[in-house]
Image: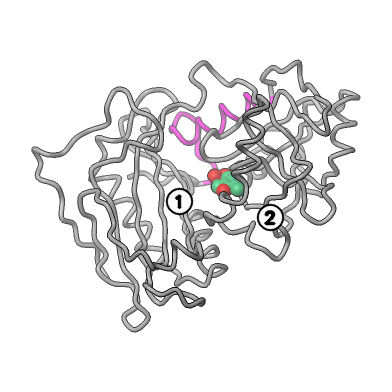
């Protein structure tokens, strides 16, 4: 199947504005394709960005059969455009689809759709330091029926919009609240899938901690409330003595981040030791108190590396590295973003240029 392109008239095309807010400004075009049980995927199309029309009874509105992805296109130093490990995102998209009983997409068609869309909307890839074009592949269940069961029709779409640098004045640490009362996901549930329901379930606690002056929630396992899982939309790493990086092992309820995986592969080549294991919150807090843990950082596509300066648990606050960005966080941030923007050698073959 090939992708049809119906572009906007050239005089109607726009480019990335000087000022924009992440997540509310979108590029000129979008990709869509439709699925019906008897026809499979069909009508792959890149057309002007538009609203979707769905029946109020569409399954996605009632039972949250929905998945998404998030990746970025980076303007590289010679004016070209880089994608970072996009095939990992499509693999995860299909794993999420399977878990949510949705049809998988053709991986090469999905990647081609991203490349064609970014190429058509290349004027939307910003070039300020640390900025990028954020790409949001999504799939929703559209069958107009309230009866419970997997939908028989779906829309797969891809939209894109500019994202500024996450840290306008250099890397700065965030404050994180360890959830004591609420849980994000349970083993056997859908925590491993990138599905909207996980976020709906976590909103209450996230809004709650913002009122207390924290920007993110750190989630503990749902069974014992003891083992560290992840932070908001990021995975989490702990640095021991400035040289060993420890992150929770994937548990079945942690979202397997591509940034996390990239750090596990990259860090050993930079002289760090990495471990994946079950991390007990009490032990972690004791290691922060004793100074064995020298840095904590979150990792995900949005911020790449987000240093954590404070952790709050059960009414006590733990300060890490004097609430300053540490050398390891900075080093990994520089190396990873260097690969993404093409200023560092891409030893792993992670970059696909458009
Ligand atoms: C997307 C996401 C991450 C980070 O994944 P990346 O592939 O590194 O962007 C971590 N946790 C959750 C819950 C997520 O949705």
What residue sits right under mark 1 in the picture?
86
Residue labelled 1 has its Cβ within 8 Å of some atom of ligand 1: no
Q: Is residue 354 left or right of residue 164?
A: left
The x, y position of residue 158, in whole percent, is 35, 53
Q: Nearer the viewer, residue 164 or 203?
A: 203
From the viewer's perspective, is 166 left or right of 265? left
Q: Residue furthest bottom?
A: 38
Q: Is residue 102 magenta?
A: no
x 37%, y 57%: residue: 111
Residue 258 seen in the figure: no
User: Would you place residue 16 above or below residue 155 in this image?
Assistant: above
Q: Are marks 1 and 2 in contact (CB under 8 Å)?
A: no
Tell which tag, 1 or 2, sits nearer the viewer.
2
Q: Say which element carries label 1.
A: helix
Q: Would residue 161 be visible to someone looking at this image?
A: yes
Identify the residue under disc 2: 185
Q: Nearer the viewer, residue 201 or 33?
A: 201
Relative image position of residue 259 (x, y in whole percent): 58, 43
Magenta stretch bounds: 328-348
Other-residue count near label 1 (Cα within 10 Å), few / some / many at <14 / 14–19 / ≥20 = many
Q: CA distance from mark 1 to mark 2?
A: 26 Å
Could you tell me which secondary element the residue under label 2 belongs to? loop
The quadrant of the image that shows the C terminus is: top left
* Residue at 24% across, 35% down: 123
Residue 86 in the image: x percent, y percent? 45, 51
Left or right placement of residue 288 versus residue 248 in this view? right
Q: Quadrant of residue 135?
A: top left
Question: Who comes first in sequence, dot 1 or dot 2?
Answer: 1
The crowd level at tag 2 (other Cα within 10 Å; few <14, some 14-19, many 20+) is many
Magenta span: predominant SS is helix
């Amino acid at each position: 199947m090939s992708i049809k392109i119906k572009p906007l008239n050239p005089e109607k095309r726009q480019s990335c504005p000087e000022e924009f807010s992440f997540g509310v400004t979108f590029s000129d075009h979008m990709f869509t394709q439709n699925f019906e049980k008897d026809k499979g995927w069909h009508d792959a199309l890149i057309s002007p960005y538009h609203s979707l029309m769905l029946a109020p009874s569409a399954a996605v509105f009632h039972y949250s059969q929905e998945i998404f992805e998030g990746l970025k296109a980076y303007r590289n130093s010679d004016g070209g455009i880089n994608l970072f490990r996009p095939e990992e995102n499509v693999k995860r998209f299909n794993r999420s689809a399977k878990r949510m009983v949705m049809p998988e997409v053709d991986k090469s068609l999905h990647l081609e759709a991203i490349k064609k869309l970014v190429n058509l909307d290349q004027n939307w890839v910003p070039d300020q330091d640390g900025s990028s074009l954020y790409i949001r592949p999504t799939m929703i269940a559209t069958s107009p029926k309230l009866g419970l069961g997997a939908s028989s029709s779906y829309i797969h779409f891809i939209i894109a919009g500019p994202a500024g640098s996450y840290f306008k004045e250099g890397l700065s640490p965030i404050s994180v609240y360890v959830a004591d009362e609420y849980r994000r996901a349970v083993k056997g549930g859908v925590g491993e899938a990138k599905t909207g329901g996980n976020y709906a379930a976590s909103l209450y606690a996230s809004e709650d901690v913002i009122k207390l002056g924290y920007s993110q929630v750190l989630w503990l396992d749902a069974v014992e409330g003891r083992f560290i899982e992840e932070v908001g939309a990021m995975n989490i790493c702990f640095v021991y003595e400035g040289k060993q990086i420890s992150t929770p092992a994937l548990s079945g309820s942690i979202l397997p981040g591509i940034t996390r995986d990239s750090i596990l592969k990259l860090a050993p080549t930079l002289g760090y030791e990495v471990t994946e294991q079950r991390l007990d919150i009490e032990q972690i807090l004791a290691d922060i108190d004793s100074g064995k843990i020298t840095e904590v950082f979150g990792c995900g596509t949005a911020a790449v590396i987000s240093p954590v300066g404070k952790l709050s648990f059960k009414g006590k606050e733990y300060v890490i590295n004097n609430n300053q960005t540490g050398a390891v966080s900075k080093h990994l941030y520089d190396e990873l973003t260097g690969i993404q923007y093409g200023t560092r050698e891409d030893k792993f073959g992670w970059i696909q240029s458009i």
